[in-house]
Each structure stands twice: as structure tokens, then as C-alpha cells.
Image (cartoon, rainbow, N blue to C red):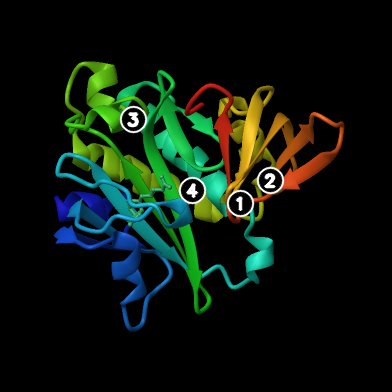
Amino acid sequence: MLDALRRVVPEWEILTVTETDSTNSALKRLSEPKHGTALLAQTQTGGRGRLGRSFLSPKGGLYLSVLLRPQVPLSRLLHLTPMAAVAARRAVADCCGIAPDIKWTNDLVLNGKKVGGILTESFGGCVIVGIGINCNSDDFSDEVRAMATSLKSVLGREVDLVSLAAALILRLKEMDEALFTQKAAWLEEYKTGCITLGKKVQVIRGSERREAFAEDLNENGALLVRYENGETAVIDFGEVSVRGMYGYI
Ligand code: BTN
């Protein structure tokens, strides 16, 4: 398996483990991480999501993180998470023949339910893009089942995890190469897949919830909303979460 993955992007260092706490955390612990180090795990015991949430990571899912050293300040990387969502969407389409929708900012969605998520983190000049996709495990609790799905549930068959990992690594390499040269085209593709746009949403900041209309994205992928009183705002990725009016999307 490792050989097959290494052949996909020979310039990158591809590592695999059966289990780790979190592939993002494991990459952060490397002593001299090289640009293009990717780690794929079969399970995570402490998978992490945005806003301090946990990400359930049983066997049968895909948990992949890649570490990049883009050599620019973080302020020039605001579009990285949206571009990673496009890379993940393309990889699922390559491998499964269906392109997931994107719920702003970082959720992959099929049939109105979350099938994957992206956690981007930075430290010491590095950024880590971690992607988790529910593939062949659909053993969700009732509470999770209301919001989550798996590729297997949608396709009616199991997905080959190595093929999907290979497609994802290839698409992430493509993203890395396009990061500063094709940003606008990738963000247009993000918009095409983004189901949040044109909808009423709730903007949730801590305990505060405000209804708004999701109008557009700016050049970095931040969400432009109009509140009911006509005020507009730019919602960036920080501590904000956006929900549909009547549920997850
Ligand atoms: C989210 O849904 O808020 C983001 C989920 C990101 C999960 C992936 S799985 C691989 C990597 N390792 C982690 O601990 N998190 C990301």
C-alpha cells in the first residue's frame, strides 16, 4: 500500500500508521518536517475538528494530513482551507464518481449530510491540512446519523481506501502547486460546490446566534452575509460556525 501511495507523488514523503491520536497532531510532533510530508492513519483515537470539536475516526474512514511550508505569512494563506475543500471534492469525484457539496467553510456534504471535514492548523512556519472522510463505516449513533453519512451509505458499496488516499494526495499536490497561481479559479470551483451560498443561515459566535443571508464569498473564501437589519459582514474562518436555519445545512 505504501509503495502505491509513494508512487503517486514521489517528491512528497508519505507515511502511514495503523493508529494515532490525530494525524494533525502527529505531524506537529515531527522534529524536522519537510514540505510535503503526508500521514495517513487507519484510525484516530483523538481525531480533532474545528472549534475544539472531536472528529470520530473509526476504522474504515480516511484520515490524512499533509504538512506544507509555503514560505509566506499566514495572512496570505486565508484561501488554503477552501482550496483544500476543492481538492477533497475533486478526489472524491475522481474515485467515486460523485462530487460532494461543500458547506462553508470546511465540510463535505452528500445528500444533505456531512461526509467529511477539514482542519487546517499552523505552527512554526508550517501549515497542516487534515482531511477526514467517512468512507466504509456507517456505525453512527442516532444523534450523529441525523447529521452524518458515509460514502458507503451513499454509493451502496465500499470504497477502496488506498485509491481514495492516492487521489487525495494527488489533488493536494495539485492544490499546493496552484496555491498562488490559480487561486481565483479554485475559489470559483468552491463557489460552484458551496451549498451555503444563497441561503438563510445562522451565524454562531459563542452563545450568540444571528440570522443572516449568505450572499457571496470574498477573494479569500470568507463568507459575505447580510443580516436582517441590512447590515453586512465578512465572516472569516475563526471562531464562527454557520448553520442552516432548520438543521445542519
Ligand atoms: C471538522 O469537521 O471540523 C474537521 C474534521 C477534520 C478531521 C481530520 S481527520 C485527519 C486530521 N486529523 C485530525 O485530528 N483532524 C483532521
Residue to which mark 4 is pinned: 174
Residue 74: percent from left, percent from top? 63, 67
Alpha-carbon span between mark 2 and mark 3: 24 Å
- What residue sits 24% from the left and 38% below the top? 163
Q: Quadrant of residue 76?
A: bottom right
Tell whether circle 3 marks a residue whose Cβ is less than 8 angstroms from ligand 1.
no
- What residue sits 31% from the left and 77% below the top? 30
Tell whether circle 2 marks a residue whose Cβ is less than 8 angstroms from ligand 1.
no
Q: Nearer the viewer, residue 119 or 213?
A: 213
Alpha-carbon span between mark 4 and mark 2: 22 Å
Q: Nearer the viewer, residue 69 or 3?
A: 69
Residue 93: percent from left, percent from top? 39, 27
Residue to which mark 1 is pinned: 237
Residue type pointed to by label 2? Ala
Alpha-carbon span between mark 1 and mark 3: 21 Å
Residue to which mark 3 is pinned: 148
The numbered mark, 1 or 4, whose residue comes first in the sequence reads 4
Residue type pointed to by label 3? Ala
The numbered mark, 2 or 3, whose residue comes first in the sequence reads 3
Which SS class for mark 1? loop
- What residue sits 66% from the left and 34% below the top? 188
Q: Nearer the viewer, residue 24 or 92?
A: 24
The circle on residue 100 is none
Residue to which mark 2 is pinned: 222
Q: Is residue 105 shown left or right of residue 92? A: right
Placement of 92 over or under 80, stated as above or below: above
Q: Is residue 242 shown left or right of residue 99? A: right
Neighbourhood count class around disc 4 (C-alpha, 10 Å): few under 14, some 14–19, many 20 upward: few
Neighbourhood count class around disc 2 (C-alpha, 10 Å): few under 14, some 14–19, many 20 upward: some
Of tags 4 and 3, the one toward the viewer is 3
